[in-house]
Image (cartoon, grey):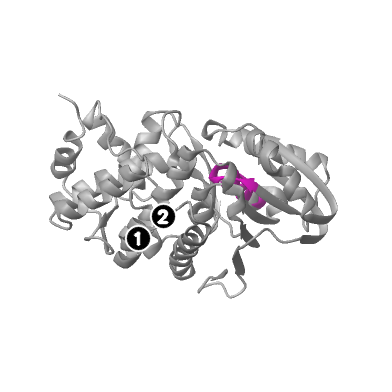
Amino acid sequence: MIVPIHLENQTAVKYDVVIDSLPKLTFNRKVAIITNTTVSKLHLDRLIQHIDASELHVVTIADGEEYKTLATVESILNELFTYKLDRKSLLIALGGGVIGDMTGFTASLYQRGIGFVQVPTTLLSQVDASVGGKTGVNNQYGKNLIGAFYQPEAVYIDTNFLKTLPKREFSAGIAEIVKMAVMFDNNYFKFLQEADFADKEDLERVIERSVSLKAEVVNLDEKESGIRAVLNYGHTFGHVIENETAYKIYLHGEAVSIGMVMANQLSVELGLMSEDESNLVIQFLMKHNLPVDYEIKDVDAFYDKFFLDKKSANNKVKFILAKGIGGHITRNDIDASVLKKVLKTFKRV
């Protein structure tokens, strides 16, 4: 299966998301694979067997969200300079969302921009992070606050990589899948409720539908000036949770899962979603072993962190909310008292 990306406002930007067994990749240029210590042990040899390049190098970094920093990017850049990569060279991201984000960001910086390819190895990165050209790193103020929109030359999605994925990581990817359904497609949500994620055919259909939905959005709005912001459903709350827990307690998809529950509770409070619809989402998340609750120790401090979000502007926070299941609405006019009322439902007495 091939899902084409063709950015509406950039006629020169076209690439394919290929959902199939990893093909032979031939490059008449220098190539550097960027991966981490965990993924390299599992998949690096297989990828190398599929690559024919004029020169091939490997840069391996530590595994973990806490290493998604400017310091790590600088260390990657330094290795690339030692290998004397030029402006025609190519980077290949082999790993999950952290590797993909950092590889893309590094590619955008090296000699003012070189090509890169995504080979995602987690479900979350296959259905979401590898598609659309968002790149970046975290800092003490929040997640992905330093970065660039920089599109890959191709994305190769092979579900065989998922065979070694821990169950917890797999579940984290499901959170990003249900995000697409709740925002855009009620029938897709109904399909997900019955889908067998252990079945290769069902899984590929799920990945294809999720990628297709994201492609439609990215094609219209690459730089998140409009509808692409909808893809941040659950993320405004989730990023605060990740920041409060120093990225060490929850996987990204787990934080998004809790964030969707919080966003849905706000939708219920505003009359945009019924309690029954909110519960359907909670039941689906719980079925796939995703967290749905979080103890907010300080409601005011949690609320203040919203203003570090990239979508905030003019002291207003943009919230992406479900309008039932399959619809969405963007609001930046929600009163602080309403928000704090919802947040207090997640605070233990």
Q: CA distance from mark 2 to mark 1?
A: 7 Å
Q: Residue at x 17, y 42 (%)?
A: 336
- Reading the image, the residue beneath label 1 is 181
Residue 26 figure quarter: bottom right
Front residue of 234 and 74:
234
Q: Are marks 2 and 1 in contact (CB under 8 Å)?
A: yes
Q: Position of residue 211 (x, y in %)?
A: 49, 62
Residue 75 figure quarter: top right
Q: Secondary structure at mark 2?
A: helix
Front residue of 69 and 4:
4
- Reading the image, the residue beneath label 2 is 177
Classify mark 1: residues with Cα within 10 Å, few (<14), some (14-19) or many (20+): many
Q: Secondary structure at mark 1?
A: helix
Say if the magenta span includes residue 101. Answer: yes
Q: Position of residue 187 (x, y in %)?
A: 31, 67
- Decide whether the magenta segment is chiefly helix, strand or loop: helix
Q: Position of residue 162 (x, y in %)?
A: 57, 47
Residue 297 seen in this snapshot:
yes
Residue range highlighted in magenta: 94-107
